[in-house]
Amino acid sequence: MPLITFTPAERAAIVQRIQKNFSEELEQEIGQFEAGFLLNFFADEIGSQFYNKGLQDAQAILRKRIDDISEAIDSLEKPVRARR
């Protein structure tokens, strides 16, 4: 699996959200470095679990769509007369 990476803009936005969450929920201020460190930690430690769950969810949706298409095709079948 490739490493989970973010564009600089995505990373900056996530770091800001981490800082905001710490401030609002824990009433603690953390700097950009600390928030970036937390982002790296979570991406490295549990990022693959979230990634895999996303893949599983996508596969489930695809299976459902394929089943729906198969059912739609089956419903188009015409009866075949038996020859005598």
Image (cartoon, helix red, strand yellow):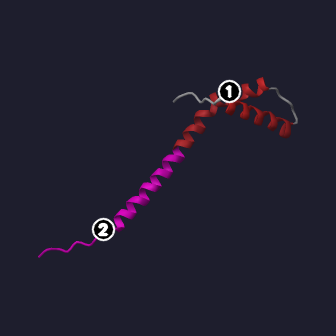
Task: Please name the amino acid that badge 2 sits on.
Answer: Glu
Residue 33 appears left or right of 8: right
Of label 1 and label 2, which has the lower sequence position?
1
Of all residues, the one furthest to the front in this rendering is 9
The residue at the far left in this view is 84
On the image, numbered disc 2 is attached to which residue? 77
Q: Indicate the quadrant where residue 15 lies.
A: top right
Q: How many angstroms separate mark 1 from mark 2 (CA)?
A: 54 Å
Please tell me whether residue 2 belongs to the stretch shown in magenta: no
Q: In this figure, which residue is indicated by the disc labeled 1?
A: 40
Residue 47's x, y, as percent? 62, 33
Looking at the image, residue 54 lies above or below residue 48: below
| 61 on left or right of 24 | left
Residue 42 lies, in percent from the top left, at 67, 31
Element type where label 2 sits in the image: loop
Estimate how packed mark 1 is, as few (under 14), some (14 to 19) or many (20 or more) residues with alpha carbons within 10 Å: some
Q: Eyeballing the image, is 84 above or below 74?
A: below
Which stretch appears magenta? 56-84
For the point 77% across and 33% down, the residue is 16
Identified at 58% across, 33% down, the residue is 48
- Assess whether mark 2 and mark 1 are in contact (beta carbons under 8 angstroms): no
Q: In terms of secondary structure, where does tag 1 sit?
A: helix
Q: Furthest residue to the right?
A: 27
Against 71, is 7 above or below? Answer: above
Q: Position of residue 53 (x, y in %)?
A: 56, 42
